[in-house]
Amino acid sequence: MVERMPRILLAKLGQGHKGALLNLAKRLGDAGFEIVYTELEDPEAIVGTAIQESIDHVGITMLENGDVDTVGRIKQLFLDRGEKDITIAVGGIIGEKELERLEKIGVDACFPKGTTYEELIQWAKENIASPKGEYRDED
């Protein structure tokens, strides 16, 4: 039986960052991840999509002063539905105050502005695994 590649759902909260998120989607796809992209911002819709698509990780981009409460709601919905293994990372223009709140919520990683695509891909390879085991690089 062939193990499937880890699946990542990419979402954005608020305006902006669409181009950067689509560029990240391409680069993660080139690195061997399966990518699902959504423009849905409703927490229930994001969680529902993640579960329906058998997602292993959710990457969210947000702007400064973004709605950290929405990220907290997404995290709580996963827990309420018994999906404790789906990891969450948040990136974008994130202020110190938001970084602290995101850490308290329990997101798995925060990537502030200036994080390179290479750093994101390396983190993904080291931290996102499909349910059957480790990341498998097809090179």
Image (spheres, grey):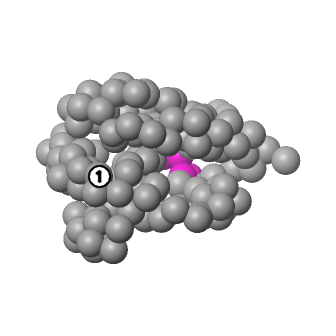
The image shows residue 49, relative to residue 16, as above or below, that is: above
**Which residue is at the front of the view, 3 or 74?**
74
- The residue to which callout 1 is attached is 66
Residue 81 x %, y %: 19, 40
- Name the residue: 65% across, 33% down: 1
Q: Which residues are magenta?
A: 129-133
Mark 1 residue type? Gly
Helix, strand or loop for the magenta stretch, by majority: loop
Quarter of image, res 105: bottom left
Q: Is residue 117 left or right of residue 75?
A: right
Q: Is residue 54 left or right of residue 24?
A: left
**Which residue is at the front of the view, 10 or 3?**
10
Label 1 residue SS = loop
- Name the residue: 48% across, 64% down: 112
Q: Is residue 103 visible?
A: no
Residue 42 x %, y %: 24, 31
Quarter of image, res 20: top right
**Which residue is at the front of the view, 101 or 139?**
101
The image shows residue 84, relative to residue 27, as above or below, that is: below
- Name the residue: 46% across, 55% down: 92
Q: Is residue 20 visible?
A: yes
Is residue 8 located in the magenta-colored stretch of the structure? no
Instruction: Mark 1: give few (<14), some (14-19) or many (20+) Cα within 10 Å.
Output: some
The image shows residue 37, relative to residue 71, as above or below, that is: above
Q: Is residue 137 left or right of residue 44?
A: right
